[in-house]
Amino acid sequence: MELGGYAAELIFEVDSHYPGNRVLLYNVYALAGRWNGAAEVRKTGREAELKYRSENLALAFALLIASPGSTIRISKNIRVCDDLPFRIQVCAQDGEREITVRDTDRFHHFRDGSCSCGDYW
């Protein structure tokens, strides 16, 4: 718990506006049964007026719970946000993970840091 909380605090120093960082810290508190801390993380996120995007949260959650080497699949019934491809490319660079994203227009398959569509978003 302490190590996870310390790591999350360091991540906040680098990028305090990325919602996935708050999801990470929230999950650390929740897994430890520290519900007051988890509630505080949500409260500060609302006060900061962060724009939570479901596909970014889905990616963050999947990275937390999926075992290394497993495929992550994200589906959305509307267009994904513009910064998602970059985030996924970074997450898929290690070559150990494949990430598939479906939006209203097409499927995207990420492996080794590149997308099957040739970055046509």
Image: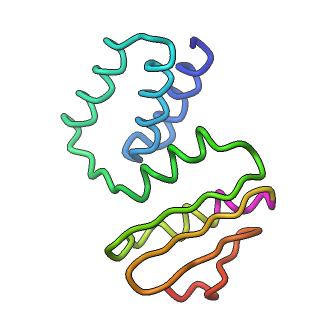
At a point 74% along the width and 62% down the height, the residue shown is 93
Q: Could you say where residue 101 lies in the image, as x and y percent from the top left?
A: 53, 70
The quadrant in which the N terminus is found is: top right
At a point 55% along the width and 61% down the height, the residue shown is 87
The image quarter containing residue 29 is top left
Q: Nearer the viewer, residue 20 or 79?
A: 79
Tell me: 78 left or right of 10: left
What segment is highlighted magenta in the picture?
90-95
The image quarter containing residue 41 is top left
At a point 23% along the width and 27% down the height, the residue shown is 43
What colouring does the structure picture have? Answer: rainbow
Tell me: 10 left or right of 111: left
The image quarter containing residue 34 is top left
114 lies above or below 87? below
Q: Is residue 14 located in the magenta-colored stretch of the structure?
A: no
Q: Could you say where residue 110 lies in the image, as x and y percent from the top left?
A: 66, 71
Q: Could you say where residue 67 lies in the image, as x and y percent from the top left?
A: 71, 42
Q: Nearer the viewer, residue 84 or 69?
A: 69
Q: Is residue 92 located in the magenta-colored stretch of the structure?
A: yes
58 lies above or below 13? below
Magenta stretch: dominant SS? Answer: loop
Q: Residue furthest right?
A: 95
Q: Nearer the viewer, residue 13 or 43?
A: 43
